[in-house]
Image (spheres, rainbow, N blue to C red):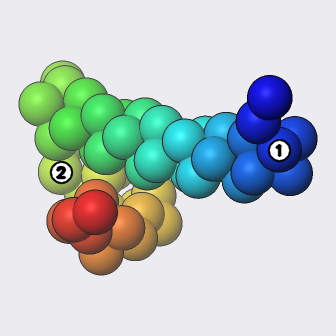
Amino acid sequence: MRNPLEVLRIKEQEMLRVKKEVDALRITVRLLGDEPPKAIHEQKVDLRQVIEMP
């Protein structure tokens, strides 16, 4: 049987990874969408998180 605390830690890491992926997809949708570029820059997005590699 696995240690519940270890399972929790792993799941939290997976959630963080998925959150970063979702943020990257949201940025991509904005960049590829019909919004004018000005509207994209008005939304504060930290692009550094998108390019982080595991």
Q: Is residue 29 in view from this perspective?
A: yes
Is 54 situated above or below 3? below
Q: Residue at x 75, y 51 (%)?
A: 6
Q: Mark 1 near mark 2, Cβ–Cβ under 8 Å?
A: no
Quickly name the residue at label 1.
3
Residue 11 placed where, x, y %? 67, 40
Q: Nearer the viewer, mark 1 or mark 2?
A: 1
Is 32 situated above or below 53? above
Q: Residue at x 46, y 47 (%)?
A: 17
Residue 36 placed where, x, y %? 19, 41
Tell me the quarter of the picture where residue 30 sits: top left
Quadrant containing the C terminus is bottom left
In the rendered view, does 47 fall on the left or right side of 32?
A: right
First reached walking from the N terminus: tag 1 or tag 2: 1
- The type of residue carrying mark 2 is Pro
Asked whether 49 or 28 is in front, the reply is 49
In the rendered view, does 28 fall on the left or right side of 17?
A: left
- The type of residue carrying mark 1 is Asn
Q: Residue at x 30, y 75 (%)?
A: 48
Is 54 situated above or below 22? below
Q: Residue at x 42, y 63 (%)?
A: 45
Give the residue furthest to the right: 4
Residue 51 placed where, x, y %? 20, 65
Quickly name the residue at label 2.
37
Q: Is residue 19 in view from this perspective?
A: no
Residue 34 placed where, x, y %? 18, 24
Element under disc 1:
loop
Give the residue furthest to the left: 32
Q: How many numbered marks are there? A: 2
Tell me the quarter of the picture where residue 53 sits: bottom left
